[in-house]
Amino acid sequence: MPAAAAAVLATAAVARELKTAAVAVAAVAAATAADEAVVVAAAAAAEGAPERQVRRQQRQRQALQAQQVGQSKPPPLRQGNNSMSYPHATCRMPLTHKLGTA
C-alpha cells in the first residue's frame, strides 16, 4: 500500500510540474504575441497605413493572444440584424392565432 501511495504522490507532483510548465509556455506565447502586435502596428504606421487597418491588426493580435492564453473573449454583439431586433423571429406560437382560427 505505501508503494501505491508513493506512486499517487509522484503522479500528482508530475501533474503540478506539467501545469506549471504549460502556464509558463502560455505566458511566453502571450508576450511574444504582444511584442509581435507592437511591431506590426509600428510597421503599419511607418508605411502610412490607415488607422482603421492598424486597429484591426491590433484586435487580431489581441484575439490570438487571448486564445493562446486560454482567456478568449466572446465575439462582440452584432448591431442591427439580430434576434433581439426581431422578437417575432423567436416566437414559438403557431400562426393560427393571428388568423383567428385557433
Image: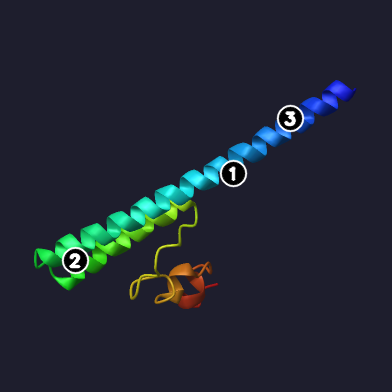
Residue underneath mark 1: 20
Q: Residue furthest left?
A: 48
Q: Is residue 12 above or below residue 51?
A: above
Which dot, 1 or 2, sits closer to the camera? Answer: 1
Q: Which quadrant does the C terminus fall into?
A: bottom right
Disc 1/disc 3 C-alpha distance (Å): 15 Å
Left or right, 15 with respect to 58, comes to: right
**x and y, in percent, of residue 54 in the image:** 21, 66
Which sits earlier in the primary sequence, circle 2 or circle 3? Answer: 3
Image side of residue 82 versus residue 5, left or right: left
Query: How would you rate the neighbour count of disc 2 (Cα within 10 Å): few for under 14, some for 14-19, many for 20 or more?
Result: few
**Secondary structure at numbered mark 2:** helix
Q: Amino acid at mark 2?
A: Gln
**Vertical relation: 22 (above or below) 86:** above
Report the mark closest to the observer, 2 or 3: 3
Name which residue lies at 74% across and 30% down. Answer: 10
Q: Which residue is mark 2?
A: 53
Q: Please, what is the three-letter code of the amino acid marked with disc 1?
A: Thr
16 left or right, relative to 27:
right
Q: Position of residue 4 (x, y in %)?
A: 83, 23
Foreground residue among 46 and 81: 46
Helix, strand or loop at label 1? It is helix
The secondary structure type at the circle numbered 3 is: helix
Q: Is tag 1's residue or tag 2's residue first in the polypeptide sequence? A: 1
Mark number for residue 10? 3
Vertically, is 48 above or below 1? below
Rounded to the nearest whole Å, what is the CA distance between mark 2 and mark 3? Answer: 51 Å
Task: Name the quadrant of the N terminus.
Answer: top right
- Neighbour class for label 3 at 10 Å: few (<14), some, many (≥20)? few
Give the quadrant of residue 3. top right
Q: Position of residue 15 (x, y in %)?
A: 66, 36
Residue visible at 45% across and 75% down? 87
